[in-house]
Amino acid sequence: MTRRVLVVDDDDDIREVAQYSLELVAGWDVDVASGGQEAVELCRASPPDAILLDVMMPLMDGPTTFATLQADARTRDIPVILLTAKVQPAERRRWDGLGVAGVLAKPFDPLGLSGEVEKLLGWDR
């Protein structure tokens, strides 16, 4: 079964590395968005199997994007994994309280990214 994942990050390099990593290592279909509003629109049009969502973005940050997705019946069941450079225990507790599927630290290992996503979501390869 081919998974479809949406990678949302305002950094072009992070989006590109994550996209190629998930496509080449795991064989998944990957869509990308450079911001929260674009991500919400893509998810409403065609919900992915999961979202990798940057926490710190201009205009609409990750937590606001997540809240918007949670408020919509069409998108609330999509599992979301946050990508963040802030991995201190206090920050992690803040993200845990949101109800996301997990948190991954940036920078991430491109070769191990799909394995981390599978582990957090309970996906079998």
Image: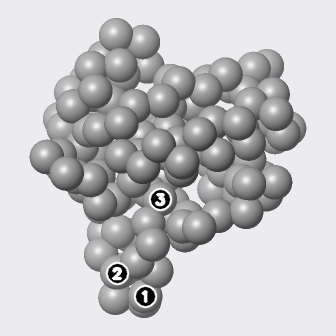
Residue bearing mark 1: 88
From the top left corner, tell me how far across and down residue 23 is, in percent: 74, 31
Look at label 1 and name its amino acid: Gln
Q: Is residue 92 left or right of residue 115?
A: left
Q: Is residue 3 left or right of residue 5?
A: right
Give the Cα separation between the discs numbered 3 and 1. Answer: 13 Å
Find numbered disc 3 in the image and state the secondary structure of the residue it sits on.
strand
Can residue 96 be seen from the camera position used here? yes
Badge 1 crowding class, 10 Å Cα cut-off, few under 14, some 14 to 19, many 20 or more, is: few
Give me the disc on residue 91. 2
From the top left corner, tell me how far across and down residue 100 is, in percent: 41, 55
Question: Does the residue at mark 1 contact the one at mark 2 (Cβ under 8 Å)?
Answer: yes
What residue appears at the point 29 percent right and 38 percent down from the top-left corner?
Answer: 35
From the top left corner, tell me how far across and down residue 22 is, in percent: 72, 38
**Toward which corner of the image does residue 91 lie, by quadrant?**
bottom left
Look at label 2 and name its amino acid: Glu
Badge 2 crowding class, 10 Å Cα cut-off, few under 14, some 14 to 19, many 20 or more, is: few
| Count of marks placed on residues | 3
Badge 3 crowding class, 10 Å Cα cut-off, few under 14, some 14 to 19, many 20 or more, is: many
What residue appears at the point 24 percent right and 43 percent down from the top-left corner?
Answer: 65
Quadrant for the N terminus in the image: top right
Against 82, is 36 above or below? above
Residue bearing mark 3: 83
Give the Cα separation between the discs numbered 1 and 2. Answer: 5 Å
